[in-house]
């Protein structure tokens, strides 16, 4: 099927989700995360951050973000994406798929080996979220590329 890009941003002073991508409630599709870029912007310090990628079963309450097709000929995605959460998604216990420890000044790109993509089920409101601690002077950013099937 089609591939999409999503930019997620979090600016808050507490540990909350940077964002998540979940299957649509009415037309769920399986999503494969294959490329993720982690970083921070603003007045960054010399601090450690831990980005956690974890499965979730609800989307929580967030600002909607529209995944953009990488090929403009593709249709709009059925996936739902959100950033800057005010109510956290429901994360699945012990379902951490990746932990990426970074210095706040660093940028890191994770690319899945062929067949090693992070996959979420075609189940309504199920998906994957990104969590990280933030500070008020820094915006935590991720860009995620997904394959919708």
Image (cartoon, grey):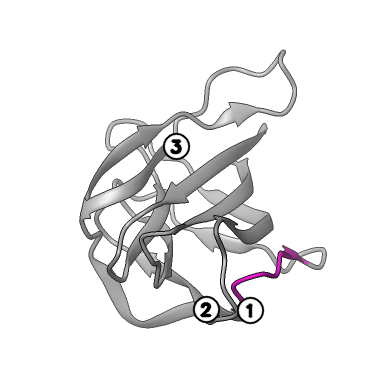
The alpha-carbon separation of the residues under discs 2 and 1 comes to 6 Å
Nearer to us in this view, 129 or 24: 129
Q: Which residue is mark 1?
A: 103
Nearer to us in this view, 73 or 47: 47
Marking on residue 49: 2
Disc 1: CA contacts within 10 A as few (<14), some (14-19) or many (>=20): some
- SS under mark 1: strand
Residue that appears at 63% across and 78% down:
102
Q: Quadrant of residue 37?
A: bottom right
Image quarter where the C terminus lies is: top right
Q: Which residue is mark 3?
A: 79
Magenta span contains residue 109: yes
Say if mark 2 contacts mark 1, CB within 8 Å.
yes
- Residue range in magenta is 102-112
Residue that appears at 81% across and 68% down:
113
- SS under mark 2: strand
Q: Nearer the viewer, mark 1 or mark 3?
A: 1
Q: Could you tell which of marks 2 and 3 lies nearer the N-terminus?
A: 2
Nearer to us in this view, 127 or 142: 142
Q: Residue furthest right?
A: 114
Q: Nearer the viewer, mark 2 or mark 3?
A: 2
Marking on residue 123: none
Image quarter where the N terminus lies is: top right
Q: Quadrant of residue 137?
A: bottom left
Name the spot of residue 53 as percent of width and height, x first: 49, 70
Magenta span contains residue 149: no
């Amino acid at each position: 099927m089609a591939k999409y890009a999503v930019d997620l941003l979090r600016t808050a002073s507490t540990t909350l989700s940077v964002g998540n991508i979940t299957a649509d409630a009415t037309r769920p599709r399986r999503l494969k995360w294959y490329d993720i870029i982690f970083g921070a912007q603003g007045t960054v310090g010399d601090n450690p951050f831990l980005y956690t990628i974890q499965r979730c079963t609800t989307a929580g309450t967030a600002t909607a973000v529209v995944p953009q097709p990488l090929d403009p000929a593709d249709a709009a995605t059925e996936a739902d994406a959100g950033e800057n959460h005010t109510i956290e998604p429901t994360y699945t216990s012990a379902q951490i798929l990746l932990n990426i420890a970074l210095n706040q000044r660093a940028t890191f790109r994770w690319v899945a080996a062929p067949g090693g993509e992070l996959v979420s089920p075609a189940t309504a409101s199920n998906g994957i979220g990104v969590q990280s601690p933030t500070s008020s002077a820094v915006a935590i950013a991720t860009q995620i590329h997904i394959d919708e099937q």
